[in-house]
Image (cartoon, rainbow, N blue to C red):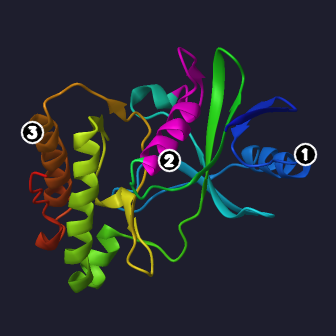
Amino acid sequence: MTRIHHFQSYVVGSGFSLTRDLLGRLAACFETPPKTADADLGGRAAISRMHLPEIGPVVIKQYTRGGFIRNFNKTTYVKFLRYRSQAEYELLLKLRRLGLNVPEPVAFAVKGRFFYHAWLVTREIQNARTLIDISRNTPEAAQPLMRELNRQVNILVLNHIHHVDLHPGNVLADDKNSLFILDFDKARTCAQNPDKLRQKYIRRWQRAVAKYRLPATLNMDMAKR
């Protein structure tokens, strides 16, 4: 069950028991400028890492805008139904119940009401590499991981969930060859025919593979389930 905490100027939702000390550590991290991913297909997410006592290593994502609007409004959003970080946090909980490997959500946080800044806290996937890195450096390991990715994407398809930006840069594998799908910001449930949704996933994935000239081992071939 998600409990809502009010701490300083932040609203923090979490299923973990967050003491004032932990909330203070998170608030201090929120105030520290994060790093922005700069690798191929790394996205524009602003990321920080820290260790939370009794929880462990976590990743903090600050939501940032893209496109032209980024030039004059980088991190402020307008609230409609739910906060952006809250929506992704709740979707991650749902996806884990469906059997998908996604980062474990620890908390979502916002600062402000109608105009707000947002953060998502998840457990860090340790000793992990992207499929881009794996395909370029240990290509023999990519093929079984692609079979697992196909299986997980089929779960998304059968549950009518559209990850709008699935590409090899936001799929990780750890040192035990467990595969994780990241970045469900803007993901949505749609009533689209599963075959059409499946083709959307394939087209988006293949476009990224071709654009970045990635090895053919990353070609997606999703059998119907």
- The disc placed on residue 45 is 2
Give the CA distance from mark 1 to mark 2.
27 Å
Q: Residue at x 54, y 26 (%)?
A: 72
Q: Of the residues under marks 1 and 2, which one precedes in the sequence?
A: 1
Residues at circles 3 and 1 in contact by the CB criterion of under 8 Å:
no
Give the CA distance from mark 2 to mark 3.
30 Å
From the top left corner, tell me how far across and down residue 157 is, in percent.
23, 42
Q: Identify which residue, 125 or 72, lies in the foreground.
A: 125
Instruction: Residue under label 3, please give it.
Output: 195
Instruction: Residue under label 1, please give it.
Output: 20
Residues at circles 2 and 3 in contact by the CB criterion of under 8 Å:
no
Kind of element beneath mark 3:
helix
Residue 194, compared with residue 156, is above or below; it is above
Q: Residues within 10 Å of mark 2 (few under 14, many from 20)?
A: some
Q: Residues within 10 Å of mark 3 (few under 14, many from 20)?
A: few
Q: Of the residues under marks 2 and 3, which one precedes in the sequence?
A: 2
Q: Nearer the viewer, mark 3 or mark 1?
A: 3
Q: Identify which residue, 76 or 128, lies in the foreground.
A: 128
Q: Identify which residue, 202 or 5, lies in the foreground.
A: 5
Q: Which residues are magenta?
A: 72-97
From the top left corner, tell me how far across and down residue 173 is, in percent.
39, 71
Residues at circles 1 and 2 in contact by the CB criterion of under 8 Å:
no
Q: Identify which residue, 172 or 44, lies in the foreground.
A: 172
**Mark 1 residue type:** Arg
Q: Residue at x 53, y 16 (%)?
A: 81
Q: Residue at x 71, y 62 (%)?
A: 50
Q: Nearer the viewer, mark 1 or mark 2?
A: 1
